[in-house]
Image (spheres, rainbow, N blue to C red):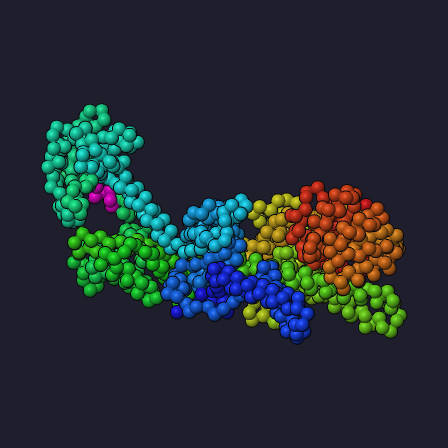
Amino acid sequence: MTEPLIDLRNADAPRFSRSRQRRSLVVLTLISLLALMVFIGFSDMGSSPTVLLMVLGVFAALGIAALLAMVLGFLQLSGRAPAPSWADQFMDEDAQGVLSTSAQGQIVYANRAYGTLTGVDDPQMIRLPDRVFGTEADAADTMFQLLRTVAEGKVGEADVRLARGATGQGAPRWYHVTARPLPEDGVSVASVADFETPYGVVWRIADVTDERARQEQVFQDLQQAVDYLDHAPAGFFSSDPEGTINYMNATLAAWLGYDLAMIDQTGLTLDELLAGDGAALLAAAPTTTDFDGLATIIDVDLVRRDGARLPVRIHHRVPISVDGSPRASRTLVINRSSGFDVDESVRAAEVKFARFFNNAPIAIAVVNRDGALVQMNAPFASLFPEQVPDDAALSAHEASSPSAAKLVELFSNEARDAVQRALDDAAAQRGRMRPVDVVIGQSPEQSEQPGMPDLGNQISAQLFVSAVGDGADTEALVFLIDTTEQKALEQQFAQTQKMMAFGQLAGGVAHDFNNMLQAIMGNVDLLMLNHPPSDPSYRYISPIRQNCNRAAALVRHLLAFSRKQTLRPQVMHMDDVLSDLSMTVDRLVGETVKLEVDISGDVWPVMADLTQLENVLINLAVNARDAMPDGGKLTMTTRNVMREECATFNFKGLEAADYVLVSVTDTGTGIEPEVMEKIFEPFFTTKDVGKGTGLGLATVYGTIKQTGGYVYPESTVGEGTSFHIFLPRYVGTEVAAVQAAQSQNQPQEDLTGAASVLLVEDDEGVRMVNATLLRSGGYTVHEADSGVEALEVLEEFGDEIQLIVSDVVMPEMDGPTLLHEARSLYPEMRFIFVSGYAEDAFAKNLPDDQEFTFLAKPFSMKDFAETVKRVLAS
């Protein structure tokens, strides 16, 4: 027997009826009063024994104390609970969830089914239905109405939908909830306030998701059937036994010139619809109880709305009900007017059918009882050019011959069983058409081009089999819908989801690692202040600093791959970029590939994001390495390209201008022309499954285009590939300004200050280092470990503080929220955000009119001091 999830009536929590409790209370009261009277009587007798008097006094006191404890609720009477009744067992076995509560809202009973519905197996975690279904606005309103109904002493019931089900997980589900009042003794309706109830409540909850789905499917099927009937190429109407038209399809209404709404409103009758005595002929038609009974066929004229006659042939049938009375008719109408006569249009119909059949957008075939192809349209034949005969239309004799192609033989072994079951179901007239996923072509392990993506040269399709059931040799119609593009999109979406997950992981790892690097680098900077190069300890401290810089570079590359890096366009020289990156590229390409970096030394400056360009060069280097599995040579060069020289390259779309040309050339296998046309397309890759995302070169193209440049590939199969990157020459005052600032910073290294700074950082190690760096520069530092504490500091020292340096991601209150709150108090307050996350991860949370400075972790003491002094001076 299924045990109840919770039952406050069992032996572990004994129960008594209120009447039994009142009887026990009366008995205890009488005994206590009797003991008190005896005690008083004995106390009046001067000769009463002292010991007896004390015993009676103690007994009376205990009785009164027990009464007081029961009144206050500190003591309850308990006893042995009766054995479970038949009703208890019945409720425990109920498939629906059952829960009852007392008038005070306490749970008294819940069966196991209730726990299963709500996803709870621990009695301590059981929740009231209004808590379970109150998580969504619509459901909460429904539950509130049910409680109001119960408060009025009525039974309430409703259907409730939860987007994630009662368990809080999974797909949307529907529940039928019934709330029944359960009056309790001693509680009156007049003693409770509004929206409260003097009743306990018995809740019954049933999962009706499948039932709702069936109802919806039935409704949709009915709507679809009506739509099919309305637009059928034949007319149809139904009339009741009194001769009133209660339904007419749109085809017949159009033939007669009627509006369907008009027919429903006016109540057209058979006498008005049929000319002459046609209504009498229909009334004389026999009724039948056999669903397959023969219909009465009558040639009559129908009267159009304008009075004209319409010759038709009617197939009329009147079924009868169980009691033998006639029901509404089923009448099929065939138009026999000029242009509709079958004898005149048989050939035209055949031609039209052939055109439709062969030009349909989906593949269609006809198979006989043996599963052999009888007829197929052109799209079907094009899917199987080698498996099916050249003549798409086979005779019945040819289709039944041993050499005729079988439908199941056209597909892979994995799909043949499913296709055969679909054919068997169609032959037996079982169920409706259900899709069967099939693959046409070679499977991945058979593909002659293992470098192609997952689908290779396959065609994915869905197959439907529809029963014909006309008694002839033809047995079923087969429809094939090409789903290759859909499957490819599904794979691309899955790949995109994987890349997004990788980006989120990389961002989180980089943030935590940057915090650790910040603490290490800050402490190393402090050590280097106290240990100059002449100090013997300096030679141990300096490698730590160098390795910190290398670790920071690795994190930048990680963020570049995940496209989570803060974008900071700056003026740079590509010679310097290649020189700095050469060591990283050399490690990436391995020992079998020789790297040569040929820089001109006098290239023009460009304006770009350093991390983006590094990502571009690393992508091209990795692709070049993969194209040289047996080793080779990778060359990276830079040079200036004058405006006049652009026309000599013969690159389509290259505008005449001054550029810095960066070329990456390998001696690998080269790229075939048909592949070259697609290399920049997202998700296109020639690598094996799981070894390429198809986003590398697409990212290269997008990065260069965003920078305002161009990228052109050149390749010869068997000789190698070159990628030429044209970056616009930067001409502006920023170069002179940067050089001037650098020249001024050389002799002037005073980065001290005397301002008051509020430092907000939740990482204690990072906060301590940054505070020490600021104090060593002469700044007055106020510290806070969260945005909430920072606001408290502002309330006390707000007039003194000139700058807030804050982390972005913090508990209780994040950096953007702190910026908003602080600016509401001090509109001119300067802000510096420091974070291991990218700036675009939180910039969207800021109002457009807010200004701040962003400093990415990890940063050096000099970078920090320069940024603080620059912001204070702005």
The correct choice, above or below, for 493 with respect to 49 in the image is above
Query: Residue 836, percent across and down?
Result: 70, 58
For the point 35% across and 60% down, the residue is: 438
Look at the image and tell me in which quarter the N terminus lies: bottom left
Q: Residue at x 71, y 66 (%)?
A: 551
Query: Can you give x and y, in whole percent of width and height, for residue 772 in the image?
Result: 83, 61
- Identify the residue at image location x=29%, y=52%: 364
On the image, the x and y values in percent for residue 862 come to 81, 58
- For residue 729, above or below residue 636: above
Taking the image as shown, residue 642 lies to the left or right of residue 496, namely: right
Q: Is residue 615 left or right of residue 359?
A: right
| Near-viewer residue (655 or 193) | 193
Residue 351 part of the magenta segment:
yes
Between 331 and 394, the one lying in front of the other is 331
Q: Find the magenta span and give its range.
A: 348-354
Identity of the residue drawn at 76% across and 66% down: 520
Q: Quadrant of residue 731?
A: top right
> In the image, 844: left or right of 255?
right
